[in-house]
Image (tube, helix red, strand yellow):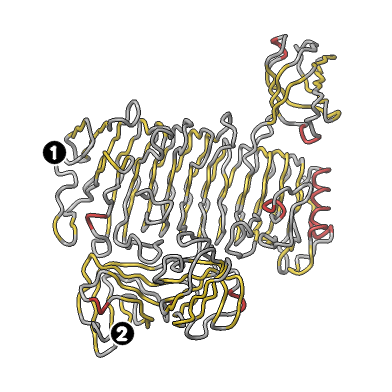
Amino acid sequence: MSILDVKDFGALGDGTTDDRAAIQRALDAAKSTGVTLHFPKPSVAYKLSKYIDLNGMKNLHITGDSATILHPSDDTGVTIDAIATSVSMARSAFLIRNSIDVTIEGITFVGGNNPSITVNAGSGVYARNCNGLTMERCRQRGGFSLLQQDNQFDTTGTGDSLTVSAGIVTLVDAAAMFAEECVGQRITISGTTNIVNSGEFVIAGYTSATTITFAAANAITETSSFLWSLADGDRNTTLLNCRSDGVRGYISCVNDSKYVGCDFEWPANADVCGIGGSFAVSGTTVTFTAQAPRFLPAHQDKYIKFAGTTSAGNVGAFKLTYVSSTVVTFTNSAVSPPPVSETLPITGTWWVLNGEKAGVGAGPTAIVQGAGTQNVKSAAAMFGSDDVGKNLRINGASNANNNKQGVISAYVSSTEVTIVSAAGTNETFSGVITVDGYDTGTNGTTYGSSHGFYIFGSSSAAHGRQNILIDGCTFRGNRTCCIKVSGTSAPIRGVRVVNCSAYECGPFFIGGADDANEHTGMVVHNNVLVDCNTQRAGFDSGGIIVIMGSRGTRITDNLFHFTRNGIGSVNGIGVGNPSGISASRFVTGISQPIDDLTIARNKFTADPSQCDGANIFGAYTISVNGVGLKAKYRTGGTLTKHGIPFTAAFPEMASTNVPGASRLLFTPAWSRAVAMRVPGLGRKFWTMISWMWP
């Protein structure tokens, strides 16, 4: 097979010249000749002013020698047109439409860094009505996502006639719904007068928008109306060994697809948190020693905040000096009460307010609320003109509407910026201000990272998502949800998440219905989840794996391990309280109930110096509607609460302490199991739970 080189069509790859027209010419040539299109490694990068249109492609192979393509993912000057009907399409690098068997290998897409996902909407690839899209060894840096897929379902219509001549059938539909790209796609015909005319066929020819042809040896001419369905929906996508770094959005998953060996990483700028430790005071200098290595040189001049200390004089936020991975120092000039040397109890928490830069408010003029904006002043120079578009966090304001995050909309001076603020009030403020280039700051609980994968159905109840495999993927630093399988008004079936790993993330998996649709057959198996945290407002639901309305879900052989806690916390929320699995019928009387849920052979371990034992898996480890079944796992050894042995978590051979359970059965074995039926939550809500002693 011959190869076309984009540079032969005028692409320069110098990072400055707009290569869009040259690359479009090369793609058009590849479409007409059916050859491979190659992007040689550029001197800098290929630059696009807007999307490249790949329409009606068949068996197209695009390769790159570690080639980088810059696309305007957050350029507000790039708007919609007749082809790209959304800014997500217009700001992507490749817009692939009505295509079959397109393969992209070895391309790195680079988007912008605007923190708003409504602005930073463009992806490396945006696909609509594509069957058999494959991406291998591709990478996305910045922008919305490596791949947005439109989740379009098959086109359907009512035919007017079938005319047969020498085994060739001419189909006419006056509604004019066909396009040249239909050739090679499958069409299913049903409801014909002659049964031999019903079935699945491959479109061989396009005559006009009303007329197509296909081969059918036994077909019979007829003029009665019938139904047809064109298999042009998004399906059969494969992602192999791809990588996403610092993206703002998610990869949307489609039917009959697999996503294998993909890596996701987000900026590690969440608050760093811990429990316990000790204060040593000498005059106004305080040395704080953590129980475990948590501090980094990058924390120099950040602010550390404490809560739950024995002495009120040690509460507050202080600008730290980095000493070692376990030791920081700071100045505390409080007089009444003064700081004192003490051991921070296990109920006490601390967290480093992270971000690119930090400072404190200017006092009486620090926060001034305007019409839809708020001016924020710092006590010393900390802002720059390049902070516009970044997120500013105000920590510890007395007014709840001021204690928030907001996008910086204007730079005023080195000590003053304007942020977007719908509500707030003038306030004297001397607390901590942080600036971050990644978090979105749309409200007080929103982070910059969205899901890694998002599986959702169409708005039609007749269509959904099914047969999706996510295998061997790695997630690091996602603070929203690694894999979300919900938010749909259509059924989802057969989602398998296996052999993945997540580090320092929020919830790993949220699956099930918040509506009455039938969601069945989800499997979450053999995943390693290290230092994940559930305290993510709007996404916690009490667990790292969260199951909502569904049938036949299996959660098996997963490892939950905590060497630290509160990774994704904001303002210390949830520090010391990571938890494991939650099952919750989301909306009583509306959502599908949870039926046939199996939870077995999951293992939970934790570093006792960093987790409050009784809350390792919390009151909501297995929780239905927040009431009824509440069970705690046991990890082996002695489970403690604030240093006191805790024995109420499934004592051996006991059959009590499970409120709301109508049936409870323990079986003797090294892995003990319990089967429970919870009243009022479906025809049969049987939960299999096991725990293991290491």
Q: Earlier in the sequence, mark 2 or mark 1?
A: 2
Identify the residue shown where x is 41% and y is 61%: 568
Residue 184 occupies which quadrant of the picture? top right
Instruction: Estimate how packed mark 2 is, as few (under 14), some (14 to 19) or many (20 or more) residues with alpha carbons within 10 Å.
Output: many
Q: Is residue 297 visible?
A: no
Q: Is residue 11 left or right of residue 140?
A: right
Q: Which residue: 21% across, 69% down?
A: 345
Q: Residue 49 placed where, x, y %?
A: 76, 61
Q: CA distance from mark 2 to mark 1?
A: 52 Å
User: Residue 340's x, y, as percent?
Assistant: 21, 82
- Secondary structure at badge 1 equals loop
**Residue matched to label 2:** 332
Q: Name the one closer to the observer, 195 or 44.
A: 195
Residue 260's label in the rendered image is: none
Quarter-of-image position of residue 305: bottom left
Up the image or down, 670 lies above or below 163; here it is below
Classify 10 Å Cα crowding around label 1: few (below 14), some (14-19), many (20 and above): few
Position above or below: 127 against 197: below
- Pick whichever, 99 or 646, lies toward us: 646
Query: Foreground: 165 or 412?
Result: 412
Going by the numbered disc 1, the residue's amino acid type is: Met
Residue 653 is tagged as 1
Q: Position of residue 236 (x, y in %)?
A: 61, 37
Residue 118 percent across, percent down from the top left? 61, 56
User: Mark 2: which secondary structure?
Assistant: loop
Vertical placement of residue 5 versus 430, above or below = above
Q: Quadrant of the N terminus?
A: top right
Is 625 on the left-hand or right-hand side of 176? left
The answer to whether residue 145 of the structure is visible from this angle is: yes
Name the amino acid type tagged 2.
Asn
